[in-house]
Image (tube, rainbow, N blue to C red):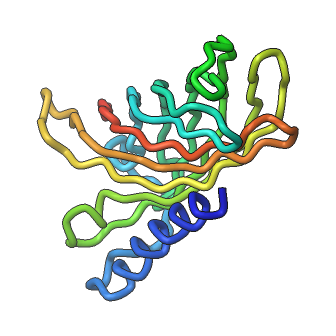
Amino acid sequence: MMKKTLLCLLATSAFSAYAQEATVGTFPEPKEVSNRSEQKVHMGLNLGVNNPAGGYDTSLGMGVDVGYQPYIPYGVGAEIFTADMDRNNVNNDDQRTAALARGTYNFGGEIPVIRHSFVGVGVGPVLTGGIIDIGFAPLTGFDIPVADLNGSALTLGANIKYLYTTSETADAFMTSAAVKYWY
């Protein structure tokens, strides 16, 4: 578990350290949103790997997220995701479903990938096999534009997070690919 937490923190630190060497603008100056395009309203689908601690099998995880940027460079949103929680190749049929409120800091500047990156945290209820916890998840990721659809962007990206829970249910390291539509 500590290795996974360290990996998540190192990835976040690597983004931040690399960004600090960048040109002015990697850390956007906080300001009010002045038009619709600066709000960065989006909806996305995530598909990836859920790797729980404590002898659980690695499984497929999937989810949806929505969000926007009410104040530059800070974003808010929500995500709902689900994954199987089977232990040691035994099909226990436990399902984990979480609904997290998210807060993010969005980088800017001219450096590819960094200018489309974010770091943040998610907090919310986590249901695992009938047990309800509160989850806390540091996260980081990026969303790179790949297409312009009538003035709206379609992005491909990735994100990682480590979900801590408040009970004895397993914490989990999660990585996923993300496809997002930006209104």
The residue under the point 48% across, 31% down is 66
In the image as oriented, which residue stretches furthest toward the front? 89
Q: Is residue 179 left or right of residue 160?
A: left
Image coordinates for residue 23, horizontal then vertical, percent = 26, 84
Q: Is residue 161 left or right of residue 16?
A: right
Question: Residue 146's image quarter?
Answer: top left
Image coordinates for residue 168, horizontal then vertical, percent = 85, 38
Question: Residue 182's image quarter?
Answer: top left
Question: Residue 45's image quarter?
Answer: top left
- Could you say which is closer to the camera, residue 159 or residue 53? 53
The residue under the point 34% across, 80% down is 18
Image coordinates for residue 107, horizontal then vertical, percent = 39, 65
The residue under the point 77% across, 30% down is 125
Number of marks drawn: 0
Image coordinates for residue 24, horizontal then vertical, percent = 31, 84
- Could you say which is closer to the camera, residue 94 or residue 74? 94
The vertical placement of 172 against 6, above or below, is above
The vertical placement of 164 against 56, above or below, is below
Q: Is residue 158 left or right of residue 85?
A: left
The residue under the point 63% across, 22% down is 86
